[in-house]
Image: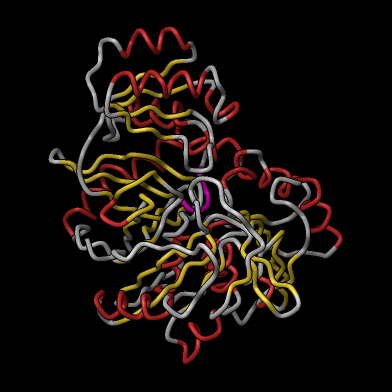
Amino acid sequence: MKVLVVGGGGREHTIVWKLAQSPRITKLYCAPGNGGISRIAECVPIKAMDLDGIVTFSKENNIDMVVVAPDDPLAAGLVDKLTEAGIRAFGPVKAAAIIEGSKAFSKDLMKKYNIPTAGYMVFDNCSDALQYLDTCSAPIVVKADGLALGKGVIIAQTIQEAKDAVNGMMNDKIFGDAGNRVVIEEFIQGPEVSILAFTDGNTIVPMVSSQDHKRVFDKDQGPNTGGMGTFSPSPLYDKKLAEYCMNEIFIPTVEAMKKEGRKFKGVLYFGLMITKDGPKVLEYNARFGDPETQVVLPRLKTDLLDIFEAIIDERLNDVKIEWDDNSAVCVIAASGGYPGKYATGIEIKGISEAEANGETIVFHAGTTFKDGKYYTAGGRVLGVTAVESTMDKAIEKAYAGIAKIQFEGMHYRKDIGRK
């Protein structure tokens, strides 16, 4: 089979790396890909949001399956376009991807179907939102309704901070059109757990649990990022909690989407907060999480291509999905200044040393490969993953691996998995 993966980050590198292990794939492409992906798949210079370009390339190259990994092309309807062109595509259609594309939609869905989540209000008028905030107490959460590269959530410590966030989103357009509507949400507390799940719209199969570190600095200090590291499994997510989430959150979500005429087929991500009142949904994503994918897929024993095909054909029930019992840790190496402004084009050294002896897997998030050298091309540059029999061993190996990598301005957290 010839398979094209759309995207060019750490998540896509992990998906390509896993698919490359399938004996049934004869040719792998990635659009646009990155430096690391170029070593295992043919990268084609088509942007993830060039929907027509991806459809044309798929037709001309007789692609058997397209895996749409990022949120933007899913929300824009790339799976619909590919399907209409007669090309098999993995991922939710536009009508289903709205579960991530609109926070207002997902909150209303949870309210309608009694799926546990934080209390909230939705506003498309700035003065109404500001007026409402006068009746609230801090801390409080302000969210841009649309997709904002994982940065559209502000936890305001004061009401003034919340008002500044609303003004920034709705009037100053700091997140563009994503902030035309805002969700103001009660602040809930507790540890977070990420659960990715395969679903064909009828059956849902949760993957192994993981926990993400969002803040840029150690001890959860500094601004939020797209994720500075992650580990799997989560020690919080025991059998009892898994059962509760399956019955009260996962199955009800899939059923709710079906009832709304928005059958969801693909990977559904549940961002959960384990509060004193039980687990609540913080957010849904309509695709694999990043960097959670970098610790979840290395633990998957089943052929990923078989799972994708079963989901497209709505026969997920027939596939036995198996995982190993190991622990996995991924530490992100970021550019100097990230999540603010940062430089690119800086040479990276030590990747092959980090991967020597198969001790760690280095997933590329923002790199290019030119004349035998890797260069930085993003804020999050690399994810160094180690899989071991215990969490402590995996932490030790991941940090031993990242210590061999250098580029100017590189920084990373020293406490991933040590919560």
Residue 175 at x, y = what percent? 55, 31
Quadrant where the C terminus is found in the figure: bottom left
- Residue under the image location 47 percent in, 56 percent down: 290
Residue drawn at (42%, 86%) of the image? 359
**Residue located farthest toward the bottom when viewing the structure as drawn:** 357
**Residue sitting at the far front:** 408
Q: Quadrant of the N terminus?
A: bottom right
User: In front: 369, or 283?
Assistant: 369
Most frequent secondary structure within the magenta stretch:
strand
Q: Position of residue 312 (x, y in %)?
A: 58, 56
**Residue 340 vs residue 275, the one in the foreground:** 340
Q: Is residue 292 left or right of residue 137?
A: right
| Residue 116 vertical position relative to residue 325 in the rendered view, above or below | above
Disc tally is: 0
Which stretch did the figure color magenta? 264-268
Residue 32 colored in magenta in the image: no
- Residue drawn at (78%, 59%) of the image: 45
Q: Position of residue 145 (x, y in %)?
A: 48, 28
Picture layout, residue 107 above or below residue 342: above
**Front-lying residue, 15 or 198:** 15
- Name the spot of residue 258 as percent of width and height, x first: 47, 38
Query: Which residue, as the protein is rendered here, is positioned at the far right?
Result: 60
Looking at the image, is 146 positioned above or below residue 286?
above
The image quadrant that residue 403 belongs to is bottom left
**274 displayed left or right of 299:** left
283 w.r.t. 202: above or below: above
Residue located 31% across and 40% down the image? 281
Asked which quadrant contains residue 33, the reply is bottom right
Q: Is residue 133 left or right of residue 11?
A: left
